[in-house]
Image (tube, helix red, strand yellow):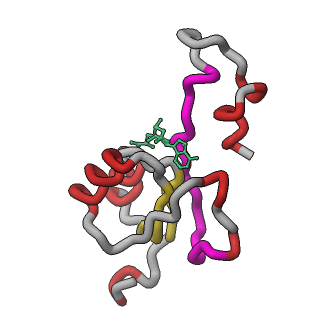
Amino acid sequence: MPTNQKNKIKFIDFCAGIGAGRFGLQNLGLCCVGFSEIDKNAERTYREFFGQEEKNYGDLMKINAKDLPDFDLMIAGFPCQTFSVIGQRKGMCDRRGQIIF
Ligand SMILES: C[S@@+](CC[C@H](N)C(=O)[O-])C[C@H]1O[C@@H](n2cnc3c(N)ncnc32)[C@H](O)[C@@H]1O
């Protein structure tokens, strides 16, 4: 992390997508220390916006918390299909809905 970022609030970006959440927090002066995203095209776009510096920790369901860097705040735009009125609304009975845990 660059020295001018050291006193900033640090966040990690789970289910990062193309980074809309990160844009908001960075614009408020917070510092992203890493992200998690499994879609390669989303990651490509994310890296176009934010560069190569932060690590993609990959599948959120497989991350060991001990491998993560120190952070103050976590954001997660987790998949909403299983909660959506357009879907079958299985919520947490669907594996995708359990990612929140
Ligand atoms: C609603 S979108 C996220 C939008 C994002 N927060 C943004 O601001 O652009 C959900 C994202 O979660 C990702 N995702 C789904 N399952 C995942 C998993 N197990 N680990 C990491 N990312 C996952 C999807 O590939 C998708 O990009």
Tell me if 16 is positioned left or right of 98 in this view: left
- The location of residue 33, given as percent across then percent down, is 46, 71
State how many labels appear.
0
Tell me if 20 is positioned left or right of 73 in this view: left
- The location of residue 30, given as percent across then percent down, is 42, 65
Looking at the image, residue 85 lies above or below residue 48? above
> Residue 62 is drawn in which quadrant?
bottom right
Residue placed at 36% from the left, 50% from the top?
A: 40
Quadrant location of the N terminus?
A: bottom left
Query: 1 and 68: which one is in front?
Result: 68
User: Which secondary structure class fits the magenta region best?
Assistant: loop
Please tell me whether residue 78 belongs to the stretch shown in magenta: yes
- The location of residue 15, given as percent across then percent down, is 51, 47
Tell me if 88 is positioned left or right of 101 in this view: left
The residue most toward the bottom is 3
Residue placed at 37% from the left, 65% from the top?
A: 29
Looking at the image, residue 69 lies above or below residue 92? below
Question: Which residues are the magenta region?
Answer: 67-83
Query: 86 and 29: which one is in front?
Result: 86
Query: 99 and 77: which one is in front?
Result: 99
> Residue 91 is drawn in which quadrant?
top right
The residue most toward the left is 48
Looking at the image, residue 75 lies above or below residue 91? below
Residue placed at 56% from the left, 24% from the top?
A: 81
> Residue 90 is drawn in which quadrant?
top right
